[in-house]
Image (cartoon, grey):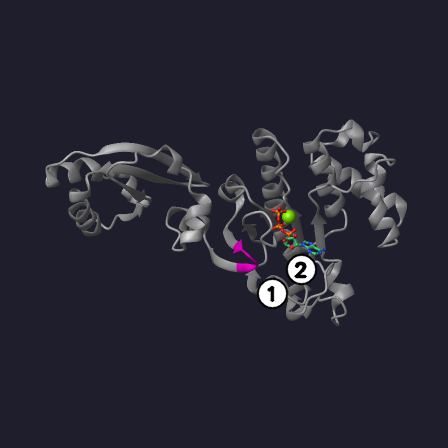
Amino acid sequence: MLRIEHLVKKFDEDFVVLDDIDLSVNKGEVVVILGPSGCGKSTLLRCINGLEDIQDGRVLLEGEEINPGGKGAEKSRVKIGMVFQSYDLFPHMSILDNVILAPMKVQKRNKEDVVKEAREMLERVGLASREESYPRQLSGGQKQRVAIARALVLDPEILLCDEATSALDPEITKGILALLQKINKEMGITIVVVTHQMEVVKQICQRVAFLSQGKVLAVGRPEKLFVWPQEREIRDFLREESDKLPETGVNLKLFFYGEGNQRPIVTQMSQELHTDFNICWAKLEDFREDVYGSLVLNMKQEDLERACAFLDSKDVTWEVIE
Ligand SMILES: Nc1ncnc2c1ncn2[C@@H]1O[C@H](COP(=O)(O)OP(=O)(O)OP(=O)(O)O)[C@@H](O)[C@H]1O
Ligand SMILES: [Mg+2]
């Protein structure tokens, strides 16, 4: 549905913000773009939306080019809804007026129809009773919901959400993500979410693209990326355990998934190698349906080689943590 090919964005001659980005999004998918602050996530969304000019490459929506000035630009852009992190609501207008503004001004639609649809969307996002309120009377999570309703009322095929949840507390974040999931399932809208929060990825996405310094380092199923990211940089970004680990001996991290969770690997290893380990950190991750686990063992340097050989023989993925 959406294809980004060799996209290059520079803010000036020697400041390359996005460097040869390739990414595809299928119809009906929820894709998360994850990465550290300043890596170019918002800029990428703005390029997709045609709000930024690009220096090379193309953005295609259903096969039509939507770069600013590109042939299909105007036609395609109406299919894209955008939720900005700052919500961008007009403070002097009621919630309902905020939601109906664009369909009336940009799409020149009849007010009665737009109001009816706006009310449906406000109901969908759980704010049916607040249409008379003003933005300042709403919480951050509620404003976020209005911003989502306002994007939906334009009837987009694809919804881009920039840091849709980063300013919100974990419970409200869950609610917003559940709402996005509902929109995806019930309305069939393709969703691209930008975030630096791993929780977002775990809860909603089918695929995640990891962006770093303007490059896509990896794309894949979230569990693949989190359980065993090949790239050191992604492992470092996602690392949670490092400051709690012992400084003596060796720390070895094991990854378990699928039936790996059920096997008594650690006790077996201890018995076979006739040695003891300390379990110094462990975590189970819930990825939508599946549970994935990781575990850090501390052991003596001299046991390391045999331990790794044992784990290899059992097909367990491991990593020595420096
Ligand atoms: N209009 C602009 N002019 C010049 N530089 C810009 C402009 N907008 C963004 N940048 C720079 O481009 C880089 C990427 O910015 P961007 O906002 O895309 O990052 P981000 O990944 O969204 O970060 P965050 O997670 O903090 O929102 C940053 O170094 C930023 O300073
Ligand atoms: Mg940003």
Residues rendered magenta in the picture = 211-215
> Front-most of 128 and 172?
172
- How far apart are the two marked residues, 2 and 1, measured between alpha carbons? 8 Å
**Marker disc for residue 48:** 2
**Marker disc for residue 124:** none
At mark 1, the secondary structure is strand
- Would you say residue 224 sits in the magenta stretch? no
12 is higher (above) or lower (below) than 279: below
At mark 2, the secondary structure is helix
- Say what amino acid the circle numbered 1 marks: Ile
- Horizontal and vertical percent for residue 66? 71, 66
- Would you say residue 214 sits in the magenta stretch? yes
> Front-most of 103 and 221?
221
Residue at image position (38%, 55%) is: 230
- Horizontal and vertical percent for residue 193? 60, 48
Left or right relative to 98: residue 237: left
> Which residue has dot 1 on it?
4
Asked if marks 2 and 1 touch (Cβ < 8 Å), the reply is yes
Residue at image position (50%, 42%) is: 198
